[in-house]
Image (tube, rainbow, N blue to C red):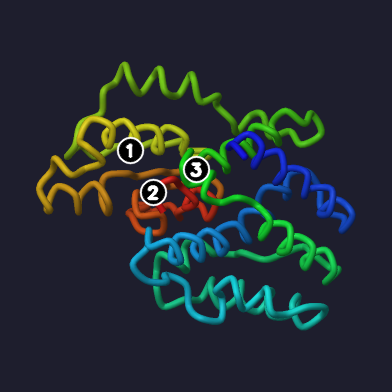
Amino acid sequence: MNNQDIVQKLWNLCDILRDDGINYSDYVTELVLLLFIKMEHENTASGVLKAHKLPEYARWPEFTIRSGLNLLNHYKSSLLDLSQSVDPLIAAVYADAQTSLKEPRHLEHLIKSLDTIDWFSAKQDGLGDLYEGLLEKNASETKSGAGQYFTPRPLIDSIVHLLKPQPGETIQDPAAGTAGFLIAADAYIRSQTDDLYDLSEKQRQFQRNNAYLGMELVSVAVHTPTGIAGSAGTARPRRAAAITSAM
């Protein structure tokens, strides 16, 4: 299963969301709220993450063992608790997060469907690409009106390669949107530095925690190399952009 297949499978789940009265503009957000939890679980299980970043109540198995109203209520309360986390980055990722799902069976179906996906393939191609793929699907739907928020990856990559961002530079996007330029800049720098291993520890820490700033009028995206860490300036890291290939 390649990345495109996974994106299509994720997009097909939107039929479930539509049955619950969720409109186009909320499709991606609803999926990403669950995807973040699922990918944190997958990356911890595979050793990509050394330890869980999410509290125990919000880890994937806590949702797979529940069903019915118990599942929906636990999910809603988890989103609220995550938004109030003492970890400022978790709190930022889940700031104002809430689900519009009303039917417990729809949430249960989403969770079971996510469990059937070959996430190893996703990690090989980059988790950030899944989010971008969903955005592209959303932008292509004329009813969603999301095209204004999406810049095609080839155009972003071309601009980044012309700018040639360097380690140690602070890279800011004052109209970050979905943070595509910040994500691409990080990927470019990693490709030039053997995934940051050519840098000193001090330089790596800067790249991971302070190099990228994104601003938006709405809740905005800041890609962070460790998946859920980084600096957002006065903007909030977008919960979706935290699902990246480096998570």
Secondary structure state at the residue bearing disc 3:
helix
Residue placed at 42% from the left, 23% from the top? 157
Secondary structure state at the residue bearing disc 1:
helix
Q: Which residue is mark 3?
A: 128
From the viewer's side, name the closer residue of 106 and 163. 106
Please name the amino acid that badge 2 sits on: Ala
Q: Which residue is mark 2?
A: 246
Q: Position of residue 132 (x, y in %)?
A: 57, 37
Residue placed at 79% from the left, 62% from the top? 109
Quarter containing the C terminus: bottom left
Query: Upstream in the sequence, badge 2 or badge 1?
Result: 1
Secondary structure state at the residue bearing disc 2:
loop
Please name the amino acid that badge 1 sits on: Asp
Residue placed at 59% from the left, 30% from the top? 150
Q: Residues within 10 Å of mark 2 (few under 14, many from 20)?
A: many
Q: Position of residue 226 (x, y in %)?
A: 35, 54
Q: Are marks 2 and 1 in contact (CB under 8 Å)?
A: yes
**What's the distance in space between the residues labelled 3 and 2, CA to CA?**
8 Å
Query: Upstream in the sequence, badge 3 or badge 2?
Result: 3
Judge whether 214 appears above or below 52 on screen. above
Judge whether 71 appears above or below 88 on screen. below
Please name the amino acid that badge 3 sits on: Gly
**What's the distance in space between the residues labelled 3 and 1, CA to CA?**
12 Å
Q: Which residue is mark 1?
A: 186
